[in-house]
Image (spheres, helix red, strand yellow):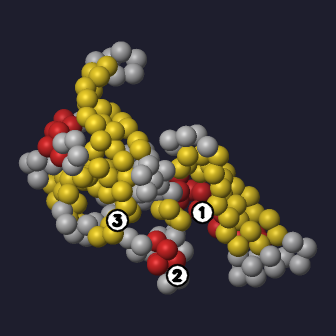
């Protein structure tokens, strides 16, 4: 499947299971692309890689719920706004720039639970933003937990994920892993991903 593709510079993606986000589009190329996709059209929303500013191929397939023109915040002109609803996590085989817009080519659904069961250490950060974390362990240093906490974009509700690394690594290394996960989720909404 091929669909229009929208790179999101700040990495904010809707939850793939019905999360709703809206934003403004100032770039004429991407504004035209949103209009070409139209209300009800599908669009692949994905982050820009923080490592090389490249197009990161994992994102969320979303449906455009509404498109409108409105005054920009601060009253400095008007812009094209759109509201989207996330449908599922996907991966693009590659991207193609065309006259009508950027296309995600070879979109395929990603089943994160299946990938986790196969041993891939995946954390999906779509729909929420990490604020921090902490590492705890018991006196014998065998039961280690990493907690990452943050908030949902839609509701502002506090959320947290917990990983148990019981005996797999030393507490000091677990603390380093905690910081790496937070840094990764803040720059690309998928931490430790190897699809």
Res 140 quadrant in image? bottom right
Q: Position of residue 84 (x, y in %)?
A: 34, 44
Residue behind mark 1? 180
Residue 115, position in %: x, y? Answer: 46, 78
Q: Is residue 101 left or right of residue 187?
A: left
Question: Mark 3: which secondary structure?
Answer: strand
Foreground tag (2 vs 1): 2
Other-residue count near label 1 (Cα within 10 Å), few / some / many at <14 / 14–19 / ≥20: some
Q: Judge whether residue 179 can be spotted in this image.
A: no
Residue at image location 21% in from the left, 49% down from the top: 41
Element marked by disc 1: helix
Residue 114 percent coordinates (x, y): 46, 78
> How many residues crowd around disc 2 within 10 Å: few (fewer than 14), some, or many (20 or more)?
few
Q: Residue at x 42, y 57 (%)?
A: 16
- Discs 1/3, front: 3
Q: In the rendered structure, which disc, 3 or 2, sits on the residue that comes first in sequence? A: 3
Per the model, the C-alpha gap separating discs 1 and 3 is 23 Å
Q: Residue at x 68, y 64 (%)?
A: 162
Is 154 situated above or below 166?
Answer: above
- 183 left or right of 60? right
> Can you identify the residue that label 3 sits on?
90
| Sequence-first tag of 1 and 3 | 3
Return the residue at label 2.
Answer: 117
């Amino acid at each position: 499947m091929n669909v229009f593709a929208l790179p999101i510079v700040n990495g904010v993606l809707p939850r793939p299971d019905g999360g709703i986000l809206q934003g403004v589009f100032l770039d004429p190329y991407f504004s035209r692309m949103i209009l070409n996709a139209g209300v009800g059209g599908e669009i692949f929303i994905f982050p820009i890689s923080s490592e090389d500013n490249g197009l990161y191929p994992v994102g969320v397939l979303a449906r455009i719920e509404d498109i409108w023109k409105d005054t920009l915040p601060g009253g400095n002109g008007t812009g094209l706004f759109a509201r989207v609803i996330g449908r599922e996590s996907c991966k693009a085989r590659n991207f193609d720039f065309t006259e009508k817009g950027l296309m995600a080519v070879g979109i395929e659904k990603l089943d994160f639970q299946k990938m986790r069961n196969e041993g891939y250490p995946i954390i999906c950060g779509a729909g929420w933003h990490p604020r921090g974390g902490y590492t705890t362990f018991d006196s014998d240093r065998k039961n280690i937990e990493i907690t990452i906490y943050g908030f949902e974009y839609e509701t502002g509700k506090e959320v947290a994920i917990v990983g148990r690394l019981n005996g797999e690594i030393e507490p000091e290394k677990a603390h380093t892993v905690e910081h790496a996960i937070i840094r990764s989720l803040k720059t690309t909404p998928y931490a430790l991903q190897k699809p």
